Structure formats: C-alpha cells, structure tokens
Image (cartoon, rainbow, N blue to C red):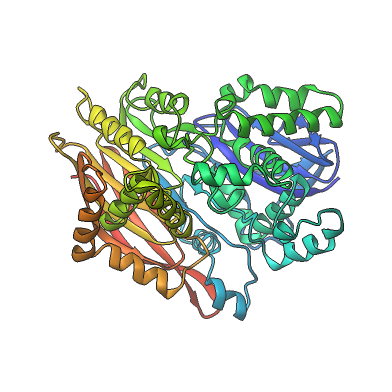
Amino acid sequence: MQLKLGPLLRYVDETRATVWVETTEAGEVEVLGHRTRTWSVHGHHYALVLIEGLEPATATPYEVHLDGEKVWPPADSPYGPSVIRTPRADGTFRLTFGSCRRSAPFDEQGFKDFGPDALVALAERMTSGAGDTEWPDAVLLLGDQVYADDPSDVVLEKLRAAHGRRPDSEVADEIGNFEEYTWLYDDAWLNPAVRWLFSTVPLCMLLDDHDLRDDWNTSLTWRRWVTRQSWWHDRVVGAYASYWVYQHLGNLSPEQLDKDPTYAAMRGLDDEDERSSYLDAFAWEADEDPASTRWSFYRDFGARSRGVRLVAVDSRCSRQLEPDERAMVDAHEWEWVRRHTVEASQPINHLLLASTLPFLLAPGLHHLEGWDEAISSGAWGPRGSRLGEKIRQGMDLEHWASFRRSFDDVTELLGELVRADDPPNSILMLSGDVHCSYLTEASLNGVDHPRTAIRQLTMSPFRNPVGWHIKLANRLLDSWGMTKVLHRLARSAGVRDVAANWRTAYGPWFENGVMTVVVRGDDADVAVDHARLVDGRQKLKSTLRHRLTA
C-alpha cells in the first residue's frame, strides 16, 4: 500500500483538521494517532482523516502512515516536514488566492509557453528560511485547477492511447470520464513543491468552466447544444464525481461532513460497485437538478466573534439560463448566500465574498456584457439575438455583469451589509478567471458606508498567461473613451445603470502570480506578488502592498 496523491491539508480550526489522501489500495490511514479506513470508487482508494485535540495557536508537524508504515514526508524531501498550524494567537489571518494553473514542464519551452509557476514560487518562498510568520493561513483555489478540455502533453499521450474506446473525434483529445479526470489531478498535484505546499497550508477550492469545458453553462443555447452530444453524460458525471472527491469534500467542516449523505454512502456502502454507482448517480443529478446539491461553502477564520468569514459562491453550476430569468445563481443558491452573509448569526468583521468569476470588471467590459445580454434576450430583435449569442460565446461574456439580475442582487446584498447596525470593516470580493490581476475600489450609490471598504480583488493566473492581443483588449476596455462608448451602446439596448460605482485602482497585471489578503483586527491589507524566473529558480517578487481599510 502506497500513497498515490496527497496528503492535502483541508479544513483547520482551533483544535481540528482534516487531511485527504489517495492510496494505491485499501487499508488504514493514520495521521497524528487518528485512524480511518479508505473507501474506493472506480478502482481508486481515498480517505479523509479527521484529527482532533490539536493545541490552539500551534504548528504541529505530522506524518502519514499506511497500514502502520510511514509514507510521508519523503525521506529526501527538500521542503521539511508538513505541519498543521491552528489559527494564530494574535488574530492575524493571511489568505492567498488565485486561479488558472496549467500543467507543463519546468524547462525552457515550458517557461516560454507558460512562464514560472506561482504556486511553486510560493512554496519556495515559504521554505527560504524566513520563518512562518509570512506563511499563508489558507490558500483559496478559484477554479481551473485542471483543464479537462485542454490537457497537458503528458495526459494527452494517455488519452490518445485510449481512443479506441472513445471514438468521438470532437472530444478525442479531451477528458471523458472519472478515470481520465484522475490523470489530470495526478498531473497537477504531484509536483514536489506543490505537493508540500498543499500538505502544509489548508486548502479551499471552487470549480470553474475548464474543470469541465470552456464556456460551461454560458447560455441556454450552449446548454441545449452540449446536452445533445453523445459524450456529454460520461463527461459531466466524471467531472462532478471527481470534483466531489478531489476538491469539494475537503471544503466541509467536520459537522458538515457528518450531515453529508454522499460522504455517508462512501463510508457506509460495503461494495465498490455500489459506491461508484451512487457517486455517478449523485453527479448526474447534480447537473440535471442543481438544487439537489450545493458546491458553495463557507469558512470562519480567526476569532469566533467578529472574525473573518469566507463565503465561496458557486457561479458555474447553479445558473438559471432561461432568457427571461437569467441568473448567475438560482433562487435556492442565492438564499443560501444571504443566509451566510446578511443573516449570519454572528457579526462579521471582514467578509471575503469569493466567486471564480469577478463581480466587478473593467467598466468598459461591464457595459459590453450588459449590452450583449440585452440584445441576446431580444432587445434588438431576432438578428440581434443571434449576434449577441455569437459574441457571448466568442468573447466569453459570461461574468456577473452579463447576468444583470444577479449583479443587482449582489449590489442589494452589499447595501444590506453596510447599512447593518454593526457592519463589516471590509467586504472583499475575491475572484480569478480573467487571466489578469487588478484591484478595484467600489462605492454604493445613495448609501453612506465610510466604515466599510468594498473592494474587488482579482488574481489570475497561477500559470497560464495570455497573448498580447488579450492584454491590449483589457487595457482598451478600461480606457475612459471606450468606457463612454460602450456605456452609450448598453443604454441604447435598454440597459439601465447599476447602483454602484467603481474604478480600477491598480492593475491590470498579466503575469503569473498570487494575491494575499492580510487581516489584523479591524485592518485589512493586500499583497500582490508575481512569479519570476531568477537564476533558474521560480520566485515571487512583490508588485504591490496596499491598505484596503480606511
């Protein structure tokens, strides 16, 4: 019995933690004296170990034992022991986040095509001898951790060897089922630096379109097309089932795990075929009926009272796509978001509202998406609808700005939060997806909120830079002149203005990198770091340090 993938450190609070592993066969997994048996689906073996009794404000090195044999950390690891750090005694909290990471070699061609890897550079910084005071307390992976529609050359070779059993020429070089999704995770997570990082810093994860396919749920037209394809069933079942196993399961707290019926089935059913069938049925229903499951989640960090709350909103799977009722998240999902923000049982000092797709875009792009949604819905007649749909899919116009009903819901939610008797000191909207990083300062129209800073923090990519034409388009769409033209275009299609104003204060930057929110009591700062190749080593270099709160 060997360790195939992991360990991944997932949930951590003052006294508890969960550690996820994949093993080569069935057996017992032990971490810090806490043991659990593996469970299997589709020939793969997994375990999520719950560790209890940790000391608050401590760093505890740990090992992983399989059937009594030590398998982690490797004897030759240059990164030192993996540790579980419970929240800091002084209340400081650091969350590093970003999205979009391609798997590619670390050679001359790999660096030329994709640049240095920001997560590798983060691990290198953490092990540089500077101490752990600057280590992140959690890492938030905001989508596109794997590319099912554009896999690496390593995975592509495996797929091409398997084409005899899946002859669909359109998707012959794409991931098609659960087994092939496991190849993606092996390819993405087995790098030694990233593996150590993921074993040492608690991880939170959300999925985005490339976890399944580019433009996933962009529109009803796209949805109707894809569900008619012969390959769709196996693809979507493999995507959701593997996402639940590899990413979503670790997002849950011990209390949430106890209430999760799918987790109970994985541990309670005796037969692997039964477990596999159960998970596949769960995955298919998740796509057919989004209300049947929930991928959004929340976590509280720091002190129990007036701490930091992360609310991670699924902006991909629960969309409502009917033209007259378009919504980024359906009513069922939005009620959950409200319940864990404006109706939270305890005051929130800093709200981190995360979505893979940015809430606030460059103003010009915001107006463009509003115009496109309007004409796609019939504002300029049938020909306009066809044009709008073509532009929408061709330019990936699918952010919150293109779901105006949901954008208004977010604006209303922000207003309720800042008008509360005890409002947050900051509302920080964290996003990725757009392959650039920027900081936006926002204010609500007609609402006085001097105490609450509202900011959009967008970081992308970890490792997947864009070409010069995308960079030029981003800068053009953020210009005063183009913003004015697109604003008039949107209004000509009947798009009304929203109840907020914002501006890009810093950026956009297009290099691979990470962004870190640093909370100390009432204050919040942000650090922007971009990856560089220095003397053959991947390192993070500081781009911006900025105070977010007044």
**Quarter of image, res 530:** bottom left
Please provide percent x and percent y for residue 116: 53, 70
Q: Is residue 124 above or below residue 40?
A: below
Asked whether, in this view, residue 348 is left or right of residue 502, the answer is right
Please provide percent x and percent y for residue 38: 79, 34
Of 345 and 330, the residue lying toward us: 330
Please provide percent x and percent y for residue 397: 41, 53
Q: Can residue 272 be seen at all in this image of the molecule? A: yes
Of 501 and 76, the residue lying toward us: 501
Q: Can residue 207 be seen at all in this image of the molecule? A: no
Q: How many numbered markers are drawn?
A: 0
Q: Residue at x 26, y 62 (%)?
A: 478
Asked whether, in this view, residue 272 is left or right of residue 195, the answer is right
Q: Residue at x 32, y 53 (%)?
A: 361
Q: Is residue 112 above or below residue 207?
A: below
**Quarter of image, res 207:** top right
Q: Residue at x 75, y 51 (%)?
A: 180
Of 24 and 396, the residue lying toward us: 396
